[in-house]
Image (cartoon, rainbow, N blue to C red):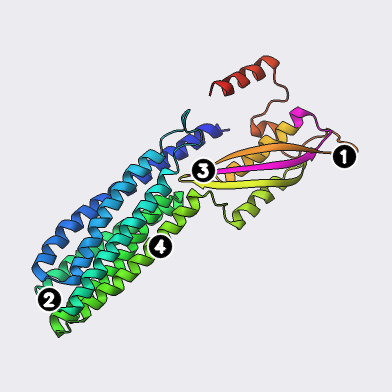
């Protein structure tokens, strides 16, 4: 049977690699679009095009922030940070929400000024071509980010993906504004689209900031996940109940703690075997989780040490452990 520790390390290595590639793709896409949209804005003088350019500038800062945050969050736990560095991800997401809200405010101000003093839109064909390129590049990036988020549920990459999804709608709005303003001479459409895009960007900033805040405040996992954890624990023979279940997420990591009610007359070795089996079962259901189980004795009339209905060797626990090995294990724990 494969070593579960090696399997977990292999999964974490694949996760880290994909998440880093997602941040590289995001940063590269943002830089390419900045150059293209800058030229298009100078040519068209469209407020909608300017709104898209401002959004791409903020995207590049946010993507760079995500890149550094994801790399830092993947740093292994050390003596000063026993639970790892996963909180770097929601911190980056909070900063992203600020960047995004700032871009929306700048866009709103410029759009209101253009409502007061309308300006004609020129070079419409060039602007539409640039926005078409932007849509294709953003679609490819969002598809890759969505795959990574579904696989690893990274809050930083999810935040990055949210504002690129907003970009898709914004880019379509820019094309509509260019067509109506450039070909139909409807001057007010351009700033009105800018205001609508600003409102949508603000909504995205709020959603990102809210999710990051909840993670920073150690919000519990969803109720369905908590119920699943309890069901897994109660499915093992010898587990009479589950209480004090506490869960939280920290970037790419999940932490699960619970107390198991076990027959008080069980031997220590047998209670430990049951607890290890529960830890393994929960870890298989939540691969990125660190699971900690505490055994609480209840007071039964009797506790026969009969055969378990799961294989003891499947959880890597020996029937008896020499005292020297136990002391060595405690020493290693103290050293850490």
Please tell me the numbered disc located at residue 206. 4
Disc 3 element: loop
Where does the magenta region start and end?
253-270
Circle nearer the viewer, 2 or 3? 2
Circle nearer the viewer, 3 or 4? 4
Residue placed under numbered mark 3 in the picture:
288
Is residue 175 shown above or below 1? below
Check contact, mark 3 vs mark 1: CB within 8 A: no
Report the residue at 45% width, 46% height from top. 251
Distance, label 4 to label 1, CA atoms, is 52 Å
Along the polypeptide, which appears first: circle 2 or circle 3? 2
Along the polypeptide, which appears first: circle 3 or circle 4? 4
Residue placed under numbered mark 1 in the picture:
300
Report the residue at 20% width, 62% height from top. 53
Disc 1 element: loop
Query: Within 10 angstroms of label 1, few (less than 14), some, or many (20 or more) residues?
Result: few
- Image coordinates for residue 315, horizontal then vertical, percent: 65, 33
Please identify the residue farthest to the top as the structure is shown: 324
Distance, label 3 to label 4, CA atoms, is 27 Å
Please tell me the numbered disc located at residue 269. none
- Image coordinates for residue 114, horizontal then vertical, percent: 18, 75
Query: Within 10 angstroms of label 4, few (less than 14), some, or many (20 or more) residues?
Result: some
Horizontally, residue 109 falls left or right of residue 95, namely: left
Disc 4 element: helix
């Amino acid at each position: 049977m494969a070593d579960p520790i090696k399997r977990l390390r292999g999964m974490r290595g694949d996760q880290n690699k994909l998440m880093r590639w997602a941040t590289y793709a995001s940063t590269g896409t943002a830089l390419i679009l900045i150059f293209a949209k800058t030229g298009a804005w100078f040519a068209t003088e469209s407020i909608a095009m300017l709104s898209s350019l401002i959004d791409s500038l903020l995207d590049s800062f946010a993507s760079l922030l995500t890149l550094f945050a994801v790399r830092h969050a993947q740093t292994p736990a050390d003596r000063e940070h026993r639970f790892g560095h996963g909180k770097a991800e929601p911190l980056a997401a909070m900063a992203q929400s600020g960047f995004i809200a700032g871009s929306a405010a700048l866009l709103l101000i410029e759009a209101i000024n253009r409502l007061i003093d309308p300006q004609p839109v020129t070079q419409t064909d060039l602007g539409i071509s640039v926005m078409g390129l932007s849509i294709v590049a953003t679609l490819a990036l969002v598809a890759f980010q969505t795959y990574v988020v579904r696989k690893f549920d990274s809050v930083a990459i999810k935040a990055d993906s949210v504002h690129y999804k907003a970009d898709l709608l914004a880019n379509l709005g820019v094309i509509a504004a260019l067509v109506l303003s450039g070909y139909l001479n409807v001057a007010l459409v351009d700033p009105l689209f800018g205001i609508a895009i600003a409102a949508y960007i603000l909504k995205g900033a709020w959603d990102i900031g809210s999710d990051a805040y909840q993670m920073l405040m150690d919000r519990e996992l969803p109720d369905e996940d908590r119920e699943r954890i309890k069901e897994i624990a109660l499915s093992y023979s010898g587990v009479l109940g589950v209480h004090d279940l506490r869960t939280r997420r920290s970037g790419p990591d999940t932490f699960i703690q619970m107390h198991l009610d076990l027959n008080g007359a069980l031997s220590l070795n047998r209670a430990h075997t049951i607890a290890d089996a529960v830890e393994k079962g929960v870890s298989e259901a939540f691969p990125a989780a660190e699971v900690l189980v505490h055994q609480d004795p209840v007071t039964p009339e009797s506790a026969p040490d009969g055969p378990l209905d799961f294989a003891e060797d499947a959880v890597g626990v020996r029937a008896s452990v020499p005292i020297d090995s136990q002391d060595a294990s405690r020493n290693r724990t103290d050293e850490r």
